[in-house]
Image (tube, rainbow, N blue to C red):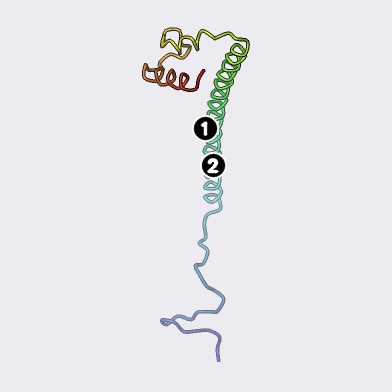
């Protein structure tokens, strides 16, 4: 018996499955590879720019939070010494003009006032 098979009138040899590799011009293949590499580098550059912007915005947020924490620490140390910071007095009296953070609503300051009063401070 012959190892070759007859399929649709054609002789097929075993072990030769799939498409035959197309004969692609070597220069065209190299150019496609170079173009792909250029696109990859461009995507990488954009990704790094995005990540750098993200890191810098997070760093700015961290700095703002540290400043806020420092302000609260100063308030606490002043209250430990028996002094009431002017910002807290403004909060307790409802005077928003003395508040350091602009843009707070009247409703928010009233809620804070009620929370402070109910806590016994």
Q: How many marks?
A: 2
Residue where numbered disc 1 is placed: 50
Q: Position of residue 38 (x, y in %)?
A: 54, 40
The answer to which of 50 and 117 lies nearer the viewer is: 117
Q: Pinpoint residue 29: horizontal percent, then vertical percent.
A: 54, 51
Residues packed near mark 2 inside 10 Å, few (<14), some (14 to 19) or many (20 plus): few
Report which residue position mark 2 lands on: 40
| Structural crowding at the residue carrying mark 1, measured as other residues with C-alpha within 10 Å and reported as few (<14), some (14–19) or many (≥20) | few
- Residue drawn at x 57%, y 14% is 75
C-alpha gap between disc 2 and disc 1: 15 Å
User: Which SS class for mark 1?
Assistant: helix
Q: Vertical placement of 109 versus 21: above or below?
A: above
Q: Position of residue 69 (x, y in %)?
A: 58, 20
Q: Which mark sits nearer the N-terminus, 2 or 1?
A: 2
In the rendered image, residue 46, in percent from the top left (x then y), is placed at 52, 34
Residue at 60% x, 9% y: name it: 82
Q: Quick one: 70 or 10, which is closer to the camera?
A: 70
The residue that appears at 52% across and 43% down in the rendered structure is 35
Decide: is 41 above or below 86.
Answer: below
Q: Secondary structure at mark 2?
A: helix
| Image quadrant containing the N terminus | bottom right
Dots 2, 1 in contact, CB < 8 A: no
Quadrant in which residue 112 is drawn: top left
Q: Residue at x 45, y 80 (%)?
A: 10
Residue sitting nearer the eye, 25 or 21: 21
């Amino acid at each position: 018996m012959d190892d070759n098979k007859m399929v649709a009138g054609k002789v097929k040899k075993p072990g030769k499955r799939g498409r035959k590799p197309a004969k692609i011009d070597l220069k065209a293949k190299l150019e496609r590879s170079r173009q792909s590499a250029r696109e990859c580098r461009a995507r990488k550059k954009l990704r790094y720019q995005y990540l750098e912007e993200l890191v810098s915005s997070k760093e700015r947020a961290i700095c703002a939070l540290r400043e806020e924490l420092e302000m609260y620490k100063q308030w606490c140390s002043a209250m430990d010494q028996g002094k009431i910071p002017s910002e807290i007095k403004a909060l307790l009296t409802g005077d928003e003009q003395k508040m350091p953070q602009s843009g707070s609503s009247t409703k928010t300051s009233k809620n804070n006032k009620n929370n402070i009063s109910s806590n016994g401070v």
